[in-house]
Amino acid sequence: MAEYIPAYVGTVTKYVFVESPTMTPGELALRAYEVSEGVLIKETCFGLQVTGEPEAVDRLIDTIRGFDPNHIFVKDRGFPPGDPRRCRANLGGARPGYLGHEREFRILRYITHGLEELDRRGAEEPAAPPAREKKKPTLDIKRLQELIETEEP
């Protein structure tokens, strides 16, 4: 295998997922471009892919998450863009990680529901779990053996 030489040394790439009833990936991309400060932004079907210096990416993500915090999620990208070890141009077909995104994207609505429920409750303490019923005593193996032996044929 050839030595890997990264194209974007010193940068990070993060995925921004949008699962919002009020904001599309396109709308989020437009807002992100306005505050990007040199961060490379790519609009995707699920949101954005942002690449840049770690501090600039973090600033951008903090800003865009503020638009709809319960519906915008962020995830680190494992391999940099164009990495020949994972790039679909070199491997053919869809990048394997996108299948994971598809699965993750389907559960975001449940995470959103949980976040909204926490916001709704505020500082209220969560309800205590119901008390467990006492277990019925189990039959000891020695006692079972005694019962079997005393059984009349």
Image (cartoon, rainbow, N blue to C red):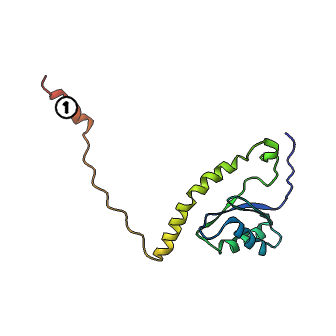
- Left-right relation of 130 to 46: left
Quadrant location, the N terminus: top right
Quarter-wise, where is residue 64 in the image? bottom right
Residue 12 position in % (x across, y down): 77, 61
Judging from the image, what secondary structure is the residue with disc 1 in?
A: helix
At horizontal 86% and vertical 55% (from top left) the residue drawn is: 7
Between 50 and 76, the residue placed more toward the observer is 50
Q: Is residue 64 above or below residue 151?
A: below
Residue occupying image coordinates x 18% and y 27%: 149
Residue 117 on image: x %, y %: 48, 70
Q: Residue furthest top?
A: 153
Per the image, the residue denoted by label 1 is 146
User: Is 116 drawn above or below residue 85 in the view shown?
Assistant: below
Is 82 placed left or right of 98 in the picture? right
Quick one: which residue is furthest to the left in this view?
A: 152
Q: Position of residue 104 (x, y in %)?
A: 60, 55
Q: Residues within 10 Å of mark 1 (few under 14, many from 20)?
A: few
Quarter of the image with the C terminus is top left
Is residue 130 at least partly visible in the picture?
A: yes
Q: What percent of the width, then of the height, locates residue 83?
A: 81, 50
Amino acid beneath label 1: Glu
